[in-house]
Amino acid sequence: MSQSDAKNAASGVKIYFRLLGYIRSSWWMFLLSILGYLMYSAMEPALAALLKHIVDVVSSGTISENRILIPAAILGVFLFRGTGTFLGSYFMAKIANKVVYDLRTTMFDKLVALPSSYYNDMPSGRLLSKLTYDTEQVIGAVTSAVKTLLREGFTVIGLLGYMLYTNWKLSLLFLLIIPVIGFVVSYASKRFRKLSKNIQNAMGGVSDVASESIKGQEVVKIFGGFEYERQRFSKAADDNRRSQMKMELTKALNIPVVQFLVAIALAVLIWLALDPNLSAQMSAGDFVAFIGAAGMLSKPARQLTDVNSILQKGIAAAQSIFEFIDMTEEVDQGTKALPKAQGNIEWRDLSFQYPNTDRLALNGINLTVPAGKTLALVGRSGGGKSTMANLIPRLYDVTDGELLIDDHDIRQYPLRELRSQIALVNQNVVLFNGSIRDNIAYGYLRDASEQEVIEAAKAANAWEFIQELDQGLNTVVGENGVLLSGGQRQRIAIARAILKNAPILILDEATSALDTESERAIQQALDTLMKNRTTIAIAHRLSTIENADIIAVVDHGTIIESGSHAELLELNGAYAGLHQKQFSEE
Ligand code: ADP
């Protein structure tokens, strides 16, 4: 074993024990399933013993009462064995499904506690497959390994015990040849498996060539590539045919070869057993039962040699799950209580760089919004407006400098309390597949009364269309609200923010999905909402933010101008330019 192998084995054992930790609470089920496998395994030597009895009875001619006894014993053995199989499989499955449940819920809890940057880096398909496929893979592999280990392990012990009891000398000789045969069998099956794996890798060609030709069919036609593609395809298809046949050949050879090896072992055993010195005291029944038990050994023994590779597969999947579970969560170490913020917000010498990027998205921002005032962020897209807003609920943590609410660095507050001070409406409205009511009264707002929900909907100018729906507030909106129009979705998001009634309000292009008329109507609602709250409004249409107390122009991660509408027009700089442009467009 090389050093890295040893390290892998050690971490494999660690993972295995960690996985075992998940079944600790189900220990009694585990005991029941062990009991079941013991019952099952005990019946294998019992069958051999029964065989001996039948042969002895027949050869000695003492049939009479045995005529009932033996069939009854057979039924008894299978009844007992069946009960064992049931207990073993049922409780093992129960444990396995509980572990899958535990792993999944742990992973989900982790998922929602991860920093936003994680979601940007990880394709959601991969995440979902971790949650669904990997968990099942782990449990499938581990249960099948444990099951084999227990059931087949006990069976091997039982059968060997029976053989030793019947004729220990012969058994010991047999035990000497078993390892040799076992080694050859496991070597052969490993070779076969490796062969078929290599072959499988050579299968992709056909679909690759075909899909290229399908996608590029216009080029193939116009440039006359038909003959070339045809040859390529026929070569790939032929390679595939050859590989397929090789695989069939190895498969077809595998079973007879392995069986023949087992037959060699049995043949040697019988040759030994027929030695008069060794089998002098054996009855005909002993003899048959002994050979029978040896034959019954081959299947469990072979399965036991596979256990390790199955286990390795499970451990690899478990490793990826545990890596996920061990990921660092959002930093949440603040202890300063924030029951109700006043709403002073200050960006102080603040710089920010998104994880895994090589340039600052915000650079040296200094800006203050007094409580209850409105700050409008304007400027070209990509300038950094949303980033400035997203730092407030700590979707990301600042790289340098500070962001303060009520004169304290926001990292001093517990995340939950900080976030409960903020309501957000942004351009990509997120709705969950539930009723309109559940979407307005979402999360912390779940306990809001019907009347409050209706008030909020009215204030958001959404009540009118909700009333017209057949089911009113109970209308189910479909996945991500597909059953509603863009403007309706946005009004629901606004109603949600109104209901939250938080001291800080972030409107990131909140009215962008609306036509001018609805925008005007909602603007009134928003104006009411903005009273007595600190509001950060990001808007493309400058007409909507003219009344803001402070307007800041953000460009390339810095604030290039700030002041009131009138002041900035007076200044005749970037804001005046933007204003002029939009004015002339409209
Ligand atoms: P604005 O809101 O002014 O249009 P943003 O704040 O969205 O601008 O973006 C500012 C800069 O940060 C842009 O250069 C953008 O490419 C980059 N950026 C935005 N979001 C991310 C992200 N999640 N990861 C990496 N870079 C980002």
Image: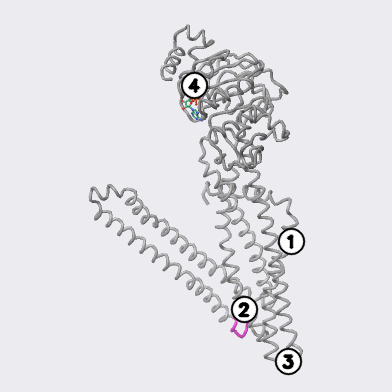
Task: Read off the residue under disc 4.
Answer: 541
**Residue 577: image x %, image y %?**
43, 13
Task: Read off the residue under disc 3.
Answer: 62
Whole-angstrom CA distance, mark 1 to mark 4, is 69 Å
The type of residue carrying mark 3 is Thr
Q: Which mark is residue 292?
A: 2
The type of residue carrying mark 2 is Gly
Q: Which mark is residue 32?
A: 1
Helix, strand or loop at label 2? It is: helix
- Magenta region: 273-278
Whole-angstrom CA distance, mark 2 to mark 3, is 22 Å
Mark toward the start of the polypeptide (1 vs 4): 1
Mark toward the start of the polypeptide (2 vs 3): 3
Query: Is the Cβ of the residue at disc 3 closer than 8 Å to that at disc 1?
Result: no
> From the viewer's perspective, is the residue at label 3 or at label 4 nearer?
4
Helix, strand or loop at label 1? It is: helix
Work out which quarter of the rendered image holds the C terminus and state it: top left
**Residue 115: image x %, image y %?**
58, 33
**Residue 86: image x %, image y %?**
69, 66
Mark 3, other Cα within 10 Å: few <14 / some 14–19 / many ≥20: few
What is the basis of the colouring in this image?
Answer: one colour
Name, please, the residue furthest toward the front. 468
Helix, strand or loop at label 3? It is: loop
Whole-angstrom CA distance, mark 3 to mark 1, is 40 Å
Mark 4, other Cα within 10 Å: few <14 / some 14–19 / many ≥20: some
Check the image and report above or below for 389 versus 59: above
Q: Is residue 62 left or right of residue 370?
A: right
The answer, for residue 408, to whether it is visible in the render is no
Count of numbered circles on the image:
4
